[in-house]
Image: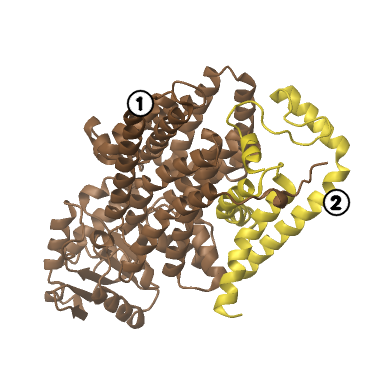
Amino acid sequence: MTDGAAALLTAVDFVAPAVVIWLFVLRRSESLLSSSLAIAGLSAFLVPSLTFLLNRTIGYPLDRLGLTGLAAVLVLGSIAWSKVILPRLGPLRKFALRIGEIVGGPTPLDANGRTRQPQETSTASSHDDTILK
Amino acid sequence: MTSRWPFNRLHANPWDLASLAAAAVPALFIAAMFLTSPIVPPGADSAHHATFAKDILESQRAFVAYSQFPAGGPMFEYPSLFDLSVALLVAGSGADLLLIVEVYVVILAVLSPIVMWRFLRRFFGGGSRDAFIAVAFVALNWFVLAKTVRDGSYGELLAAGVMFPLWLSFIWDRRDLLAAGTLFAIVLTHNLTALLAFGTFVALLLYYALERRWTRIRRTVIAHGATLGITAIIVWPVYASYLFPVTSGIAGGFPVIDLFSYMVIISPVLFVIGGLGLGLLVRRSPGQFAGLWAAAFAALSRTSFASERIAREMSIPFAVGAAGLVIGLVGAQRTGRIDRRARRVLPLAVVVVLTAANGLWGLASNTDPAALHYLEPYQLEAYRWLSSHSNSSEAVLALASVDPFLSVFVPNDVFPVVNLHQADRLSKPDRDMDIALVQALFNYTDTGLRGVFSANRIHWVVLSSPFPSPTWIAPEDIPFIQQAWDLRLDSDPGYMLQYSVTDVHGGATRVFEIISSGGAGP
């Protein structure tokens, strides 16, 4: 592999998991700009943090293959979670929401189990969608 | 039905483009600093981080050794996500480690105001123009960013520059688990920023309490407490590395700065204008949080952890305050609350021009690499000679203050000794080791003291002349370096001068081989 290709692949290993996890797993109905700003920050620590935990618990390797392996698992796992696993977790999700309501107060999710936009403060992120529409 | 896919909602907005441009300003200064910095990045801490990343790669362990010396220090390790990231980038790309450090730092410098922008959009919430004003003020006046990067404190750039505002933005979004996960990443990355984050967390809870948002308090506390508790079970050494320095005294004590120093550190212009802005902001929600945020930093800066560095970090809430003042003035102008033309234009112009000029001057003056450049070409020549003429199992003794990059360029273990005043900040085993090594070096004719060298496989001594002006050296280091440089080790048969190099200005490095190590070590 050439130096340029290795550098590009390394950059992708850092950024791709953050992009996929944000868009498929975490994202509320945010604007692209707002999502991109979050992805920019997540890219800086998502893969290193997970590598750190894996290295300390199971001795995960800190090398080229380890980096790309982890990124691939995160990307494919996020897509599988979003498209295959999550839709089948309805009952479990409602049960978890109920527990969440008991210990943490009213849920921020709507009746269909989707995340609601923050309403609590006048300056919350709901404004982003307004100004960018 | 509204599409979940966001790409159909992207509309180009000139204020957003302007915000992006403003966010790039600090990174331009930092990139220029690296481009004009000869050989290595400026700052002694940059040598530490390069060494840490190299150690992580070689050991394949994601922790950084806490001790000053390869042997003798406490068996404890500190997580450092910046150094791990550099190690991963080097392992992935195969590029030169110092090049990766510089490129990654510039990327972080770009990311930092961009992520801050995400938080500021939520905090001020007045639209793209207000967001631009806020981003511009924070980016221009982020002295801490420039100062810490010039010092080489890159972990702080990642933690305080990128993760801290990301954490705040997630909290503002009420994404409690994401926020808690980001706080864990801050804990993994930088101890001082973790302390500031916990102070800000208390400020946040106070703000919620003032707003009587009890559910938010409960959810925030539960999410953060659960995340930190679970991760503590998995990686207890991470948290122990915070407790250990405090309980054992390694953390040391730094003098608490006097009250006047705040104005000097933040700069008088930002101090006054930011203070006025914070005064304006705290009058209504959510500006109260900015006031509590600054107050939390101020309270933490009165402790002995790192008073001056925390004071530097106060430039961030003060820049937010300054932005708030300008946004307030613009808003007053827009709503007609200020009716006379002179009263409307003058304050706005004065505040904008003063803070912008002050910020640009601050960035420029804090990104001059000359004063913190700690590797001269002749030193590099000596390191390369040592690397090719020594066995990598032979350790090397050097002065940390004058050869900080030695460990980056040689494969050998390096014992970087510090002066006895600085040794007080080391752990007891490291302090004892430092004292024994310094005594053996300065009493080089005493073969009895020399046993500490053989006990630690130290076979080489590298000594360099004091750095020429304008390189900054700690005042207590100047006599230490000079005394070491004046030593004539080769006058003793136990040492042999194997390599010496001198440049045209008189700067020099000598490499001595220890021929006879003397008796047994301590």
Q: Which chain carries label 2?
A: A
Distance CA(mark 2)–CA(mark 1): 63 Å
The residue that disc 1 covers is B340
Q: Which residue shows up at 21% across the image and 54% down it?
A: B419
Mark 2 residue type: Val
Q: Nearer the viewer, residue B398 or A64?
A: A64
Q: Which of B288 and A103 is in front in this view?
A: B288
Quarter-wise, where is residue B310 in the image?
A: top left
For chain A, the rendered hue is yellow
| Crowd class of label 2 (few under 14; some 14 to 19; many from 20; radius 10 Å) | few
In the picture, the disc for residue B128 is none
Task: Residue B114: give x, y in percent of width and height.
Answer: 51, 49
| Crowd class of label 1 (few under 14; some 14 to 19; many from 20; radius 10 Å) | few
Mark 1 residue type: Arg
In the picture, the disc for residue A84 is 2
Q: Quadrant of the C terminus of chain B?
A: bottom left
Above/below status of A61 relative to B241: below
Residue B305 visible from this viewpoint: no
Q: Which of marks 2 and 1 is in front?
A: 1
For chain B, the rendered hue is brown
Quarter-wise, where is residue B183 in the image?
A: top right
Q: Quadrant of the N terminus of chain B?
A: top right
Task: Residue A43: give x, y in percent of width and height.
Answer: 59, 54
Above/below status of B237 relative to B317: below
Above/below status of B420 relative to B519: above
